[in-house]
């Protein structure tokens, strides 16, 4: 398999490796942290974070949630692929009786290191959860956890 094919397969295998975790601040307030790989999109991470918020909301007996604070938690960096050297040696030998002479030439080819920038998207959102009747579900910014998970 050629190098490009291997990279494509790796990208497909790692695609959608978004992770979301929850830290409870109180019984009805949580911080949802979404993290992606360099192969994920910020939209995919945002969706995974909303899905985690909806899952946690329903798991705790609530129906609705409001995002009270959100911030970008993306990380950037550079992946360095080191260069390498390849050497080739060619030579010749002349022999006559008990006497031999020879010569050799070595050529070395060096490829430079390459630096590839990357972005690992991330988001950190604080949510407040509400039971049915505690908040107007049609108010701006109110998410219905069941509806969010229905579009998963």
Image (tube, rainbow, N blue to C red):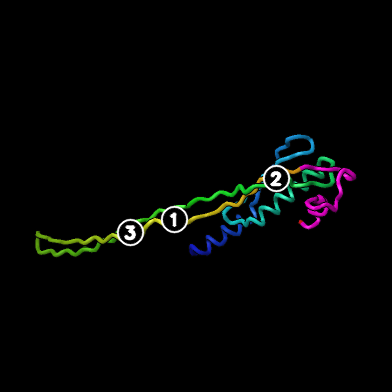
User: Which mark sits nearer the N-terminus, 3 or 1?
Assistant: 3
Secondary structure type for disc 2: strand
**Which residue is disc 3 drawn over?**
110
Residue 119: x %, y % from top left = 55, 53
Res 8 quadrant in image = bottom right
Residue 116 percent coordinates (x, y): 47, 56
In the image, residue 27 lies in the stretch drawn in magenta: no
State the residue position of label 1.
Answer: 115
Q: Which marked residue is nearer to the observer: mark 1 or mark 2?
A: 2
Circle nearer the N terminus (1, 2): 2
Q: Quadrant of the C terminus?
A: bottom right
> Element under label 1?
strand
- Residue 142: x and y, percent? 80, 50
**Whether label 1 touches label 2, CB < 8 Å:** no
Q: Residue at x 60, y 55 (%)?
A: 14
Q: Residue at x 85, y 41 (%)?
A: 61
Residue identifier under label 2: 69
Tell me: residue 43, above or below residue 73: below
77 or 134, which is in the foreground?
Answer: 134
Determine crowd level at label 2: few under 14, some 14-19, many 20+ residues with C-alpha closer than 10 A: few
């Amino acid at each position: 398999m050629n190098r490009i094919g291997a990279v494509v397969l790796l990208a497909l295998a790692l695609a959608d490796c978004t992770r979301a975790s929850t830290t409870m601040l109180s019984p009805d307030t949580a911080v949802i942290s979404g993290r992606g790989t360099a192969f994920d999109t910020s939209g995919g991470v945002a969706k995974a974070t909303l899905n985690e918020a909806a899952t946690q909301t329903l798991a705790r007996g609530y129906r609705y949630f409001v995002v009270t604070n959100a911030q970008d938690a993306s990380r950037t960096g550079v992946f360095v692929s080191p260069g390498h050297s390849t050497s080739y040696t060619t030579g010749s030998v002349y022999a006559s009786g008990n006497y031999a002479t020879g010569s050799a030439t070595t050529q070395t080819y060096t490829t430079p290191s390459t630096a590839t920038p990357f972005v690992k998207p991330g988001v950190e959102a604080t949510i407040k959860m509400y039971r049915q009747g505690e908040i107007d579900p049609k108010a701006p910014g109110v998410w219905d956890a069941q509806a969010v998970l229905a579009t998963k």
